[in-house]
Amino acid sequence: MNFLPVILWSDALVFLLLGAGVIAARYIRKHEHLRLPWQRVAQSPVAMVSLLVLTLFTTIGLLDSLHFRTALPQGNSAEAIYSPEVLSVLDKGLEPLRTQTEKTYSAPFALQLYARESVTDETGQVVREFPRLQYGGAHLADESQRTADVLQRGMIGALGGLIAGALLVWLLRAHLRLRSLRVAVPVVTMLIGITAGLAAVYHVLGTDKVGQDVLYLSLKSIRTGLIIGTVTTLVTLPLALFLGVAAGYFRGWVDDVIQYIYTVLSSIPSVLLIAAAVLMMQVTIDTHPDWFETSAARADLRLVALCFILGLTSWTGLCRLLRGEALKLRELEYIQAAQAFGVSSLRILTRHIMPNVMHIVLIALVMDFSALVLAEAVLSYVGVGVDPSTISFGTMINAARLEMGREPMVWWALAAAFGFMLVLVLAANLFADAVRDAFDPRLNRPGS
Amino acid sequence: MIAYLIRRILYALPILIGVNLLTFALFFVVNTPDDMARMQLGIKRVTPEAIEKWKQQRGYDKPLLLNGAAAGAEKITDTIFWQKSASMFVLDFGYADDGRSISREIAARMGPSLAIALPTFLVGLIVYVSFALLMTLFRGTALDLAGVALCVLLMSISGLFYIIGGQFLVSKLWHWVPISGYGEGADALRFVLLPIAIGIVSGVGSSSRWYRTIFLEESGRDYVRTARAKGLSELRVLFTHVLKNAMIPILTGVVVVIPLLFMGSLLTESFFGIPGLGSYTIDAINAQDFSVVRAMVFLGSVLYIAGLILTDISYTLVDPRVRLS
């Protein structure tokens, strides 16, 4: 075997979440009353187009979560030695983008570096000029051919994407009943086609300080954003659900204790609490360098720890909501009937109360997702976010921010990070709105 | 009223004790002072003597909770917990790593923080509520839909973008105001204008949408229908009935943040170089100055609890049915 699969902690959690999602989806499909609100979501064009975008991002994130280490070429030793560099399937797929690094900054579609360098010309004299890029547009003789070449490659890419999209729509025509989706799928594949066609020979979004392709960095950032947005719920959900429902149902001292815990936690401004916790985690990680086999493992553990810290500091709001709902539910006749029949408290909680607060949980989770993605960038800026070696929107913005003062301005890395973030968060927000509208029982709907 | 206030303050004590214990556990138990010393000194310079010296300089060389070696009351008072954590209850925050008194620093930096935070808050509130009222007035029309779409778009943009974009556009391209810095007195005006404007714009999306939801919920109620049936104009219904009755949910969300305005904003202050508490905190985080971070955590929770008490008091001002007793 010439590679060694590596399962990082965050990978395991991501696939755990994916598995839980699949099981939940199968369960929902079988039960009509659970399926109904999702059918309402499925009828909303905005929600479904958002879901399409989210699916695309998730696919990229999942591909980026399959990690491995390649074997190093070696002499006669029987035991394989693996490179300390941890790669993902996405890295492999984007091999040219990952490896074709320039010396330093270059603008999108540029043929030359951003900075002048001393170059020796044919006559042996040293001149200061913008050197040509090693990879970006290397097939062109000079700049005058670029416009035609970009157009040509863009057209070919668009055409290929369009055909693939049309084929996809035709294959899935039974499932894609919404007209907006039948338009959106080819548009998305066309965009992918154009990007793929151009990214093969240009740095579509330029390169960063050490010459890495910004498009590659942006695609890698998606996984970090998704992990922050989803793995955090693994902590938030059980804490908020069990404590909130228990506080509302049992009342008395249980309620007092739980209320005390969440009041204490929520009275600390969240950024400060996160900062304090992350600083302490950093001390632990820095004083135990022997825990980690590769630097990727260390950065990854830091990411997972950040998710846990975000989860531990953000469950209080949902907990308070659920406590209120449980207080209301426990007075209803069907709960009192269950109590009169002698059903145990645990069973009442799990069978009768929890299913009836699930819509609140779901709405809160989808609403939180976008806030968490945005928070990651801010926290990384403050210095309490992900590991500086982890590629994320926050670290991208942080690195690019320092170049604001340059003349001409290095704007492309910032634009790429903010652009990708906007698309992801906007899609998540629109989808969350549709979910809320479909599940909120306070909205009166005709015919339901 | 007075009796109620005293009771509320007494209720607040156990919460502050909880916050205090939590930060104590976080900063001294999860990682021992030895760990912190090792990290601050760097791997190379670590010798047992250096660690001891570092701890002694900061007063971290004492036992955590109980000093067995001391006599009498000193058993409890001559400990890290008593001197570093419990002392915060009398607002004695000790000294930062650079040797300056944290309390004095906080007092000096509250002014600049407020100079940004207070106008942002007040003007922002007016702008958000007016925008939300406008959307409510035109509810169900294309204007409302466009407003909501704009809100969703604005709230999907990262706060960092507003700051970076604003600095680029206003300061770098148009040269209207300096990019960053702070001055005294009237000179401060040109420095605070941009941060305030950016602070307001970055909140439009989420806040206006939130107020719109409140107004819409209120305007679906029976008394609003009655008011309309009486023949009141839509504007009158909105301002004298809906707005007044929506005050309680608005105050719940708004009053609690007023004391926290003292803390300033981390992002804005650090980007604009405002010497306020926000940039103080962010500098402390970057320098890993734990005593400052601990002090800010405690101060933040004191202000938050003050905000909760203020919220209760504010209810009596807008709703005559609420009596504090």
Image (tube, coloured by chain):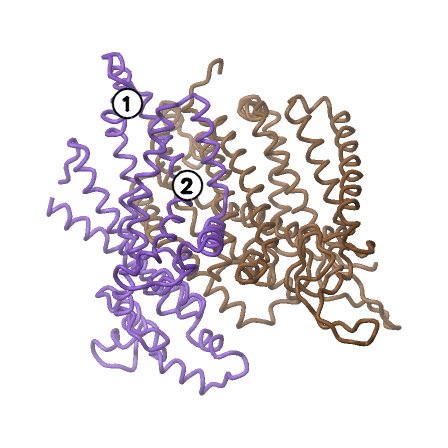
Q: Is residue A389 left or right of residue B270?
A: right
Which chain does the purple colour mark? B
Residue farthest right in this picture: A76
Up the image or down, B61 lies above or below B22; here it is below
Location of mark 2 (residue):
A318
Residue farthest left in this picture: B2
User: Observer-nearest residue: A174 or B71?
Assistant: A174
Circle 1 crowding by C-alpha within 10 Å: few under 14, some 14–19, many from 20: few
- Observer-side mark, 1 or 2, equals 1
Mark 1 and mark 2, same subunit? no
Q: Position of residue B114 (x, y in %)?
A: 28, 56
Question: Which residue type carries mark 1?
Answer: Leu
Asked which secondary structure carries label 1, the reply is helix
Quarter of the rendering containing residue A397? bottom right
Question: Which residue type carries mark 2?
Answer: Leu
Give the residue at x 35% y 24%. B137
Circle 2 crowding by C-alpha within 10 Å: few under 14, some 14–19, many from 20: many
Quarter of the rendering containing residue A240? top left
Give the residue at x 32% y 35%. B129
Location of mark 1 (residue):
B235
Q: CA distance from mark 1 to mark 2?
A: 36 Å
Q: Is residue B180 left or right of residue B305?
A: right
- In the rendered structure, the colour chosen for chain A is brown
Quarter of the rendering containing residue B324? top left
